[in-house]
Every structure is written in structure tokens, then in C-alpha cells.
Image (cartoon, rainbow, N blue to C red):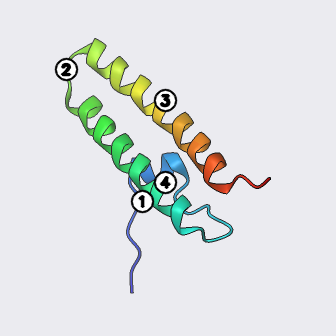
Amino acid sequence: MGTRELTYGERAVGIGFNPNGDAAVAASKMTFAQAIDQMDRLRAASSSPEQKRLASLAITEAQSAQMWAVKALTWKD
């Protein structure tokens, strides 16, 4: 059984880091990874410097949102 290379988005959200094996965390990370991959593909295909910049900003903000989402999902009082 071979392993595939992670996508840019999967690496960006740390898809493999989920110490508790929380299904909600895994699902959230995958959702954000897919959004980041979409922006990475747009950035790579675009010839517009502004569109590339906007895609990069979207990637950064998605990474931040993913971290906050994981914090919310794992919050314990």
C-alpha cells in the first residue's frame, strides 16, 4: 500500500496532526485544505499580480480560520 503526496492545502493545515483522532477536527481541516488548494490552483494559473496577491491573502486567512476552528472544536471548560 503506497502513500500519496499531500496537497499544498493538506500541508498548510497540518492534516496529519490530530493527536486525539477527533473526527470533527479531521473534517474541518479537510474542508479548509480544499479551500486552500482551490486558491493555490488559482494563484498558479493566474497571470494577474493582483489576483495572485488576493489568492495568497485568502490562503493565509484560511490557515488562520482553520486554527481557530480547531481551537473551537477542542475547547474544554
Q: Which of disc 4 and disc 2 is earlier in sequence?
A: 4
Front position in the image: 43 or 60: 60
Q: How far apart are labels 2 and 1 at the CA level?
A: 25 Å
Q: Which of disc 3 and disc 4 is earlier in sequence?
A: 4
Residue under label 3, please give it. Answer: 61
Front position in the image: 18 or 37: 18
Residue under label 1, please give it. Answer: 6
Image quadrant for the N terminus? bottom left
CB atoms of marks 4 and 1 within 8 Å: no
Secondary structure at badge 1 equals: loop
Whether residue 76 sits left or right of residue 34 in the image: it is right
CB atoms of marks 2 and 3 within 8 Å: no
Residue under label 4, please give it. Answer: 29
The residue shown at (40%, 28%) is 58
Up-down: is 68 above or below 21? Answer: above
Whether residue 33 sits left or right of residue 12 in the image: it is left
Residue under label 2, please give it. Answer: 47
Q: Which of disc 1 and disc 3 is earlier in sequence?
A: 1
Q: Which of disc 1 and disc 4 is earlier in sequence?
A: 1
